[in-house]
Amino acid sequence: MLPVFLLGFVQATSDRSQLVEGVDSLIAPGALPGPVVASKSAFVVLRTGDAPTVSAGPVGAGRAMVAGHGGFFNKDSLLNPSNSRFFINTLSWLGKRPARGLRVGLLGFDGISSAVQGQGASTVNIDRQRLSRSLQEVDVLFMEQNALDGDDTSQRIVVSWIKTGHGLFTAGPAWGWQQLNPAKNLRTDMSANRMLLPYGLGLSGDYADGSPVAQGSDDPLLQTDTALATLRKGGLTPAESARATGAVSRMLSLSPLDDKGLMAEIARLAGTEDGKKWPVGATMPFSRIYGVIKHRTWEAAAPEKVKADPSAVFFPGPVPKGAKRISRTVPIDTKIPDWHGLGLYAAPGEVVEVTIPEIARNKGVGVRIGSHTDTLWEAAEWQRFPEISRRWPLDTSKTKIASPFGGTVFIDVPAGSSLGSISVTVKGAVPAPRYVRGKTTLAEWKRMVAEPGGPWVELEANAIILSVPRSAIANLKDPETLMAYWDETADLCYKLYAAPRRPRAERYCVDRQISNGYMHAGYPIMTWEDVATTFTDVKKLRGNETPWGFYHELGHNFQEPTWTFEGTGEVTNNLFSLYASEKLNGIPHPGGMNLKERNERTRNYLAKGAPYSEWIADPFLALGMYDQIRDAFGWEPFTEVFANYRRLKLQPAEGIAQRDEWMVQISKATGRNLGPFFTAWGVPTSEEARKSIADLPGWMPEGMPQK
């Protein structure tokens, strides 16, 4: 007997052909879709790169479709012929007849009413209070992904209604749902997935950047069951293997792990792959799939059942045999949000118990193991296990936790907490060096470093905290001087951007592999481990080779969208790179911003006629424009402008209004008419804005055309 997915192959091909007839490429302006899954009898309708973004399939006698974003059917998107045709095809396929005369129910999706009616169909707003009766009045239902969250009865009613021969459309992005529901589970809490995963359809929490296309949507490597069957046979190219692995991994991240035979088979096949387990790339598909299973197993396991993962020795590192398991009570000031270090480390596979006072239960306080929060599931190659940090809510007075990988233990406090100071006791962790500027003495620091304990260290200044491996402190003799440097760095950043003091410190964290780029901003700011020792070498930090990347990412954490217009996302943050280089390193024009290179870039650009498209594409070219203002007027005008944006609550619309506002504000701060300067640089502004500053004295740097 043929498997179900092969029995349905002919029907899927016919249904797909009907749905994509006349469809080329969809648009969704301003939207970032998420991937979807297709397994069992479901099939892929549209793909974005190597991921399906629309899938569909039978649900009993009915039909359902999931899309990676509801924006495919909004008013602007439907102006695109492919979107419009796909909308018509979807209505007809779900309704099993032409769209004219269909009755379409809406649970959300209010914006599509006119589009539905434009096809000769009618719309009905579904009444949740009389759901069964409302559904009897419609043929097709458009339902938002979260419309029935927490309502199991209504979910069952809708599924039963579909199975009698009706049609359902739902759409993500699921990543958006995850951001709004960080403490909930995409598989068990989102109503769309709860309803449709049993039928092979679901919404994944990843991203699928690009335009969904019909071409290639019949690729068997995009459908979970056929992808798995093909992987078993082997012989795939790395690109094909990656595509198939993605399809299987996405489904396993959402499915119940109740097929013990399949789980055992994947574990066995993972064991047959290249014995060099790290890095794990596309040529090790079952190791990557097994990684998903291991992560899901950890999420569901009781702490006592969690075992140390073999990769923990590789990263984040082993706990030495002589390290003592201790109990420590620490006061936590909940006026300070986010992570509170404890000087403790959870050993891989060992239970740690956290005790909080009764008043703190169910108040959003949590505990985290691991500072390495970047996830690497989508990376082409894993240089460590792709997800090793986890947060648990502290909803009871005693909470037991465990991690297969181990990690630094933090108490995580939500913003706006009113609990005051609370005492938290952590039992079963090992000590780890933690230096707190102004509190830890040099003798205490030396004792911590000499004591066997966790392989990661926390160095805390007032405004910046570093998470680094023990190897990075091997030569650190004077932590006070080091952390004074980091506090000075933060103070300068606050000063330049005229930013109000934040209640918590910024964080940097060193990692074996990060999710994006060489470094990236955020909380924490993430870096690769090749710069670990630089963080702790104050001589190097203040030396002739300015640590541009450290300044660059901190600048990102402080830049504001109101004064960061098109093309300056990697520019306004680098104002701090220049500022810090000048103040901390004594280098006003570091690296590629030395005057010779800066001026040469400027001359070449002006010789081409100052094409703005080139200006917005080259951050160092654009930074040169700001640098010319700095050279002539100093840093004070920038700080004044940043303060004015905040004080005056300036919120210009994107585009020319943002450029106008910046030009006007920086002109007022310098006391000069910079309109001709902006024009010479080819940065478009409005005549009205230029006229508003025309009474100010003119200014143009040497070498610039006098316009």
Image (tube, helix red, strand yellow):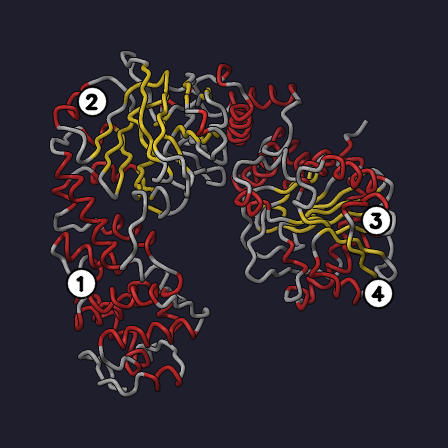
Q: Depth-wise, is mark 3 or mark 1 nearer the camera?
A: 3
Secondary structure category for the residue under label 2: helix
Q: Which residue is mark 4?
A: 120
Give the amino acid at mark 2: Met
Q: Which residue is mark 1?
A: 594
Residue 98 is left or right of residue 108, and the answer is: right
Q: Which residue is mark 3?
A: 134
The answer to which image quadrant residue 433 occupies is top left
Residue 577 placement (x, y as % from top left):
24, 56
First-in-chain label (1 vs 4): 4
Residue 384 placement (x, y as % from top left):
40, 31
Circle 1 packing at 10 Å, graded few (<14), some (14-19), many (20+), is few
Residue 265 is left or right of residue 701, and the answer is: right
Secondary structure category for the residue under label 3: helix
Rendered residue at 57%/62% (across/down):
29
Secondary structure category for the residue under label 4: loop
Rendered residue at 41%/21% (across/down):
355
Circle 4 packing at 10 Å, graded few (<14), some (14-19), many (20+), is some
Q: Depth-wise, is mark 1 or mark 4 nearer the camera?
A: 4
First-in-chain label (1 vs 2): 2
The answer to which image quadrant residue 241 occupies is top right
